[in-house]
Image: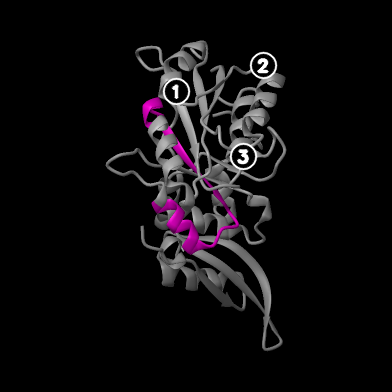
Amino acid sequence: MPPRNTQDLMPLERIRGADISHVADRARRTLGDDVMILHTRMVREGGVSMVEVLAAPSSVIDRVRAQLEPQPFPRNMRAADGAPYRIALVGPTGAGKTTTAAKLAVRRGMFGAARPGLLTLDTYRVGGMEQLATYAELADVPFEVVFDARDIPAAMKRLSSCDVVIIDTPGRSPASAELTERWRTLLDELAPDEVHLVMPATVRADLAMDIGRAYSATKAHRGATHVLLSKVDEVPRESGIADLALSLDMPTRWVSDGQDVPADLKPGVQRMLRAYGLPVDAEADWMPA
């Protein structure tokens, strides 16, 4: 997963001129008749006021939308055999997986009428289980802990009333390869339908690529299928979060923009498009998946 240049991800042109009609004409000549104006502002150049626009071809915008947009959830969250839909959260230590798992499980209507449940494999971190257990109890959400493979059948049986199960996992550390192998084996046994890589939006681009490789699929283990950027509220330049999501080359359902449970979780594609200044279909601040 080599680093990708931002301009390759979303080639944008800044074009200046005396007035908007001249600038728009230059944008069409430069980028084609399907050009879309994303931002317009007044600037001064050599003491002269000018119009500056940020523009991109609409074909590029369509490509960005297609890359970020996840497949819709199935109409019936349960499989043909009655098994609940399973969504796992993986990622580095401190990325916010446990808090995000709580947000997904306890927000009313998150999955429409589907009933959520919580399961954790994070039996190593002090306080991790207790944190999820508290949220689950307050929201009346079924909660299970899996220590080893022998626990899985009974845990899933106790979660049989749930239509979707959110699976929390430990943070990955290079110093704990044995523990990582153990929980990834358990995760494979649980066979999640989606694996979301929870990535802090504050992470350096090169480190993000390394983390992405660490959670990619291998011969032994399934890999991340989606990216979920956390700590978005800590990033000063919004377009940077869209660059990061596109560089990881995975669709995104949600972004996390704070610690408040369950409020600080938002639809991902809309947030990314707004970060680039792209048009977004009208929607409420929150729409259940």
Against 220, residue 144 (above or below) is above
Going by the numbered disc 3, the residue's amino acid type is Lys
Circle 3: element type: strand
Residue for badge 3: 266
Going by the numbered disc 2, the residue's amino acid type is Asp
Image location (x, y in percent) of residue 135: 68, 26
Who's the residue at 54% across and 51% down the image?
273
Please check the rendered image and state whether residue 221 is part of the magenta-colored stretch, yes or no: no
Circle 2: element type: loop
Q: Cα distance, mark 2 to mark 3?
A: 22 Å
Who's the residue at 62% across and 18% down the image?
141
Res. 283 in view: no
Label 2 packing within 10 angstroms: few (<14), some (14-19), many (20+)? few
Residue for badge 1: 85
Going by the numbered disc 1, the residue's amino acid type is Tyr
Q: Nearer the viewer, residue 143 or 16?
A: 143
Which quarter shows the N terminus? bottom left
Residue for badge 2: 140
Residue range (magenta): 188-213
Whether residue 230 sits left or right of residue 210 in the image: it is: right
Label 1 packing within 10 angstroms: few (<14), some (14-19), many (20+)? many
